[in-house]
Image (cartoon, rainbow, N blue to C red):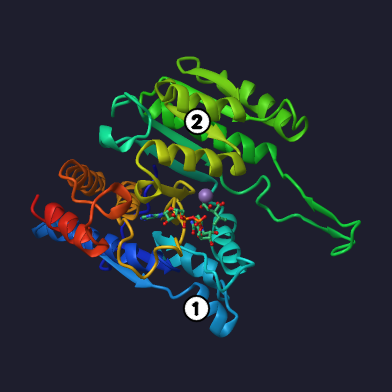
Amino acid sequence: MAVKPLREGGPAARIAVIAGDGIGQEVTPESIKVIHAAMDSHSGSARRQIEFVELDWGADKFLREGITLPAGAVEMLANEFDAILFGALGDPRVPSNQHAAEILLGLRFKLDLFVNARPVELFHDRLTPLRDRTTNDIRFMVFRENTEGLYVGVGGFFKKDTPDEIAVQEDVNSRKGVERIIRHAFEYARQNKLKRVCMSDKSNAMTFAHDLWQRVFKQVRQEYPEIESRHLYIDTLAMEVVRDPRQFDVIVTCNLFGDIISDLGAQLAGGLGLAPSGNIHPGRTSLFEPVHGSAPNIAGKGIANPLGSILTSAMMLDFLGWTAEGNALRTAVRAALQENFVTPDLGGEKKTVEVGDWIAKRVGSR
Ligand code: NAD
Ligand code: IPM
Ligand code: MN
């Protein structure tokens, strides 16, 4: 992935931090702690520099000031930051979810972060609910289209709040948008020497929008003859990833289906507490967030699993070109899982901060 040139004299990377709501506030500081530990373990000229700038965007600010994305926010992020480390948004006091839509979806759209990369990797055999499956069986990447589809918010109500009400939500698919995510999936497979790409849609029912996906897929796949490409309808894919996840290396699909299949994948690999993601536009400021939400049911208890956020930070470090540090984070997470030093969602009794401290210590003593 393309990396921005390092700034002369200043920090090597500037990261905007949006911890957000609920457990986003609890897991994100653990990530920052662990990244600092990874940076500090370098010495002399190899020492990495990183600057974090915290932004207080979320439900509290929205309820207090009515502000979701402040004026000029998108330009500031695009021009002054290399990446955004994001926690979660969602608060029971905002049932409309307006702030989450405007901030999270707003940034995905306005920064044109068309790749939502959601890796599914089983780190320890005991974590999968699938019988007899091991770490060798569950390892695939989901590429979710992230700027179009049913998420664009085009639609409306007719005769709202009457018995004759009609609600319309448009599914927007551009040739450019479909092509760039499918191409990204093939490029990723080629670069990582992965043999199989599966495109998933619902073209048997969505005969316009997903007919476009079919035609673009057939065109792009021709440029990658060494890669085995196949198509599955999304309902079949959901069934097949459970029946035999070994079939998949790379999955590419639309925005909504990618949202759903990535939660399914997360559960195959130990649950939402462990699942990372990146919202990426190669070469531009990109946003990294755990797949999970703000988990109001456990927020404030100090028991949220920080490993999803820490693995997300590893993806961010990869994106910044710091793969050694990214790998150090992943190795430490693997070790915590091996030693069962985990939060209650994974059957342990450790607190969020204890797990973060443990990982930071591991990473720092490389
Ligand atoms: P959720 O991911 O917040 O929680 C689902 C379940 O998983 C809950 O039981 C929760 O306790 C558990 N869980 C999630 N992350 C965990 C972690 N790190 N450690 C331990 N357990 C964890 O999904 P939800 O309950 O459907 O949504 C809650 C709010 O979050 C909603 O407002 C939703 O819109 C929002 N949301 C935001 C994002 C995001 O910001 N990227 C993603 C998903 C949901
Ligand atoms: C996710 C979330 C979001 C999405 C919500 C909060 C809008 O579920 O990041 O997976 O659907 O994209
Ligand atoms: Mn989701």
Q: Residues within 10 Å of mark 2 (few under 14, many from 20)?
A: many
Q: State which quarter of the image contains the N terminus.
A: top left
125 above or below 240? Answer: below
What residue do we see at 36% from left, 37% from top? Answer: 269
Q: Is residue 80 visible?
A: yes
What residue do we see at 18% from left, 50% from top? Answer: 341
Q: Quadrant of residue 149?
A: top right
Residue 339 or 33: which is nearer the viewer?
339
**162 left or right of 210 in image:** right
Q: Residue 307 at x, y = what percent? A: 29, 52
Mark 2 or mark 1: name the one nearer the start of the chain: 1
**333 left or right of 200 in image:** left
What residue do we see at 17% from left, 61% from top? Answer: 357
**287 left or right of 316 in image:** right
Q: CA gap, disc 2 to disc 1? A: 37 Å
Q: Which residue is mark 1?
A: 60
Residue 343 or 107: which is nearer the viewer?
343
Residue 74 or 170: which is nearer the viewer?
170
Q: Residue 312 at x, y = what percent? A: 35, 51
360 above or below 134? Answer: below
Q: Amino acid at mark 2?
A: Ile
Q: Residue 294 at x, y = what percent? A: 45, 62
Q: Nearer the viewer, mark 2 or mark 1?
A: 1
Q: Residue 157 at x, y = what percent? A: 83, 59
Label 1: element kind = helix
- Label 2–label 1 contact, CB within 8 A: no
Q: Which residue is mark 2?
A: 251
139 above or below 273? Answer: above
Q: Is residue 48 visible?
A: no
Q: Residues within 10 Å of mark 1 (few under 14, many from 20)?
A: some
